[in-house]
Image (cartoon, rainbow, N blue to C red):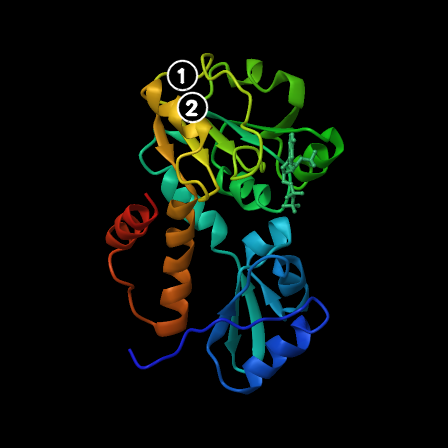
Amino acid sequence: IEGVYEAVDASPEEFPDVVKRLADEGWQGVNVTIPHKTAAAQLADHRTEAVDAFGASNLLLFRDGKIIADNTDWQGFQRCLSALPDPAYSKAVVLGAGGAAAPIVHALLDYHDVVVVNRTAEKAKALASRFGDHVRTAPWEKRSDILAGAEVLVNTTSLGMAGQPPLDIDLEPMRSKSLVVDIVYDPLSTPLLKKAREKGFQTAHGLTMLVYQAVPSFRAFTGTEPPDPEIILRKLTEERQ
Ligand code: ATR
């Protein structure tokens, strides 16, 4: 492929002008990361359904003089769920209600019961209110009890990251063969994921999401399929272990 994919720095003040300049220069589009995802959704001329649902974009496409905002973070997460049974009967618990939690809750749209649990209850309620009746909240103190009958647990808080205290939670109430996801990739194996593996649960880390959010972006930029994401994921995982 004849093309260039490179990193561009932008402060929040510069961000809208940088995007317009890149569009004028003829780039196909940009991936957008923290802290610009909300601003990216706002400056676009058109937004996909997902972007409208939770107000954040990680992919801007420049097409026919217009800026289109898409979000592939939620698709990256959905790949982690592919090995699980029918979501129509399943319960999922999401810990945290910051920017990283919104695409995760969106990806759980087919789940029967989704519970958002956050230290600051108001933030959990504000996030849940953006979605349908299948999303509810529970107090942070109840984070272990609420796992009863759940098949999926996702940690989007900073607990367990390098330099942060571990997440204090009891996985016992979860169903057997559950999936536990920690969206960080430093470290790759958080105390939570270690605990989950000891219980025989399936696990996924942040690199899975990172690689799979890149697949639709690659397609949109180049019009071709990327190399096998599983091979890329394995290689990245090995490099970090
Ligand atoms: P954002 O993605 O919006 O920048 P953040 O400030 O990085 O969010 O925090 C990410 C998540 O980690 C939040 O849900 C935060 O909980 P609060 O909303 O109550 O701040 C959670 N978090 C961070 N430290 C925590 C801790 N010590 N105990 C529980 N949750 C914590």
Name the secondary structure under disc 1: loop
Q: Residue furthest bottom?
A: 25
Which residue appears at 68% of the width and 28% of the height? Answer: 119
The residue carrying mark 1 is 175
Q: Kindly report the distance in space between the C-alpha atoms of the residues bearing marks 1 and 2.
A: 6 Å
Residue corresponding to mark 2: 151
Picture quarter with the N terminus: bottom left
Label located before the other in sequence (1 or 2): 2
Q: Residue shown at 51%/39% (left/top)?
A: 162
User: For residue 197, what is the image quadrant?
Assistant: top left
Q: Position of residue 45 (x, y in %)?
A: 63, 71
Side of 116 where 180 appears, left or right: left
Query: CB under 8 Å between callouts 1 and 2?
Result: yes
Dot 2: within a 10 Å radius of its alpha carbon, few (fewer than 14), some, or many (20 or more) residues? Answer: many
Q: Nearer the viewer, residue 210 or 91?
A: 210
In-front residue for pair 207/21: 207
Q: Secondary structure at mark 2?
A: loop
Q: Is 37 placed above or below 196 here?
A: below
The residue that appears at 58% across and 55% down in the rendered structure is 51
Residue 36 against residue 16 in the figure, above or below? above
Instruction: Identify which amino acid the numbered label 1 is placed on.
Output: Arg
Q: Which amino acid, mark 2?
A: Glu
- Determine if the C-beta at disc 1 is less than 8 A from ligand 1: no
Q: Position of residue 108 (x, y in %)?
A: 49, 37
Classify residue 82 by image quadrant: top left
> Which label was assigned to residue 95?
none
Front one among 11 and 114: 11
Seen in the picture, residue 139 relative to 101 is either above or below; the reply is above
Work out which quarter of the rendered image holds the C terminus and state it.
top left
Q: Ligand 1 sits in which quadrant? A: top right
**Circle 1: is it few (<14), some (14-19), or many (20+) Cα within 10 Å?**
some
